[in-house]
Image (tube, rainbow, N blue to C red):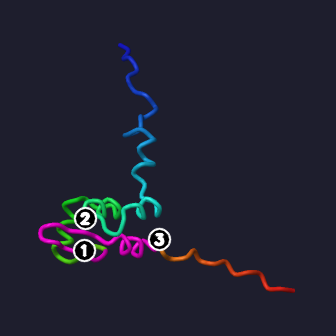
Amino acid sequence: MSTPEHHSTQIPPARPVGDLAHDAWTAQRIHTLGAVTDLSTAARIFGLSRSVAYDLAKRGQFPVPVLRFGSRYRVPVAAILHALHLPAADEPEPATPSPPAT
């Protein structure tokens, strides 16, 4: 008794490859958020779920300082950039030293 082949050696991607670039948080994309962002966005940047982010913020343990305005949480983008060791928009690019004159 033979059985038909139902298995494929190739596994399709979980989502289209084009979406991967959209999910990447680059320094430029973080800069475009403005001065502050919401806690959910900051959580995605740090790879945290929304519920974990709110729990950490309530306990004062979020990776960066969180501002609370009534029931809303806001996260300074400069703090996110600093935590990720990325230059802030107003910081100059590091200068490369010029070679010594001979």
Element type where label 3 sits in the image: loop
Q: Are marks 3 and 2 in contact (CB under 8 Å)?
A: no
Quarter of the image with the N terminus in it = top left
Give the labeled residue for mark 3.
89
Relative side of 74 to 86, left or right: left
Looking at the image, which residue is at 36% across and 75% down? 79
Q: Amino acid at mark 3?
A: Ala
Mark in the foreground, 3 or 2 = 3
What stretch of residues is rendered in magenta?
64-85
How far apart are the alpha carbons under marks 3 and 1? 20 Å
**How far apart in space, not on screen, are marks 3 and 2 (Cα)?**
21 Å
Q: Is label 2 in a helix, a strand or a loop?
A: helix
- Mark sitting on residue 37: none
Label 2 with label 1: CB-CB less than 8 Å: yes
* Residue shown at 30% from the left, 60% from the top: 41
Residue type for callout 1:
Val
